[in-house]
Image (cartoon, grey):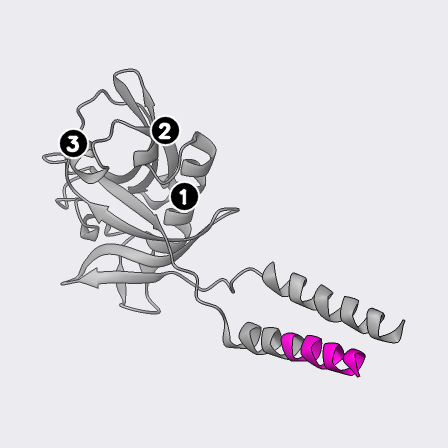
């Protein structure tokens, strides 16, 4: 009975470890020549960690043809809206602690945005085809900072941000999770405990 209880306890620890989410880290901005190109480790509420690139181009060219639901990382308005919210909170920010560059108030420093006489720039996140239109969520950076926010838009296809200084695409990809050292150590201890219980029970 004692060994059965120990085995159940160790197995419970292993199962719990299998469900431990990766530790949430702050997003890391990707900057080239003073331009914000994207970020890694962006946490989208309820969906996990993602990398994002800000790209100027056509929907078809940047999203595998922009003609199938599988072309998009997010496939509904709720998830795409959560991604837009994450951009405003973690990426389109005045990065005083890191690079010292203000990508919020100086939104034209985001790749695909600008020039400085534009009043706002929106990072577009396509998620659904709607007949001849494409449904997208957007994170808008405004020269009037209190007006930053998210919204949805459904322009016609084909659609491109080229030649539009107030729009750029935000292309998300799922980030590769890296196990934390503490989690690995705990997993190893639990596994070793399971082996020890098994050996003791065999004797």
Q: Dot 1: what SS?
A: helix
Classified by dominant secondary structure, the portion drawn in magenta counts as: helix
Q: Is residue 56 left or right of residue 131?
A: left
Between the C-alphas of marks 1 and 2, the distance is: 12 Å
Q: Is residue 129 left or right of residue 116?
A: right
Considering the image in quadrants, where does the N terminus appear?
A: bottom right
Instruction: Return the residue at label 1.
Output: 83
Query: Residue drawn at (23%, 48%), measured in percent from left and top?
Result: 54
First of labels 1, 3 by sequence position: 1
Q: Image quadrant of residue 136?
A: top left
Instruction: Return the residue at label 2.
Output: 152
Q: Residue furthest right?
A: 1
Q: Is residue 15 left or right of residue 197?
A: left
Give 114 or 198, whichever is nearer the viewer: 198
Q: Residue furthest left?
A: 163
Q: Nearer the viewer, mark 1 or mark 2?
A: 1
């Amino acid at each position: 009975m004692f060994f059965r209880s120990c085995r159940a306890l160790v197995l419970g620890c292993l199962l719990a470890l299998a469900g431990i989410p990766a530790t949430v880290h702050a997003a890391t901005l990707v900057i080239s020549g003073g331009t914000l190109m994207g970020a890694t480790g962006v946490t989208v509420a309820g969906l996990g960690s993602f990398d994002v690139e800000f790209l100027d181009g056509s929907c078809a060219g940047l999203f595998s043809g922009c003609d199938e639901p599988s072309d998009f990382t997010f496939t509904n308005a709720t998830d795409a809206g959560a991604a837009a919210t994450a951009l405003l909170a973690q990426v389109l920010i005045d990065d005083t602690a890191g690079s010292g560059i203000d990508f919020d108030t100086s939104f034209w420093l985001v790749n695909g945005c600008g020039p400085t006489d534009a009043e706002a720039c929106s990072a577009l996140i396509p998620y659904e085809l709607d007949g001849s239109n494409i449904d997208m969520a957007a994170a808008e950076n405004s020269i009037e900072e209190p007006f930053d926010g998210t919204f949805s838009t459904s322009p016609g296809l084909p659609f491109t941000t080229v030649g539009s200084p107030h729009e750029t695409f935000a292309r998300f990809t799922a980030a590769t999770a890296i196990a934390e050292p503490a989690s690995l150590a705990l997993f190893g201890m639990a596994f070793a405990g399971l082996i020890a219980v098994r050996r003791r029970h065999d004797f």
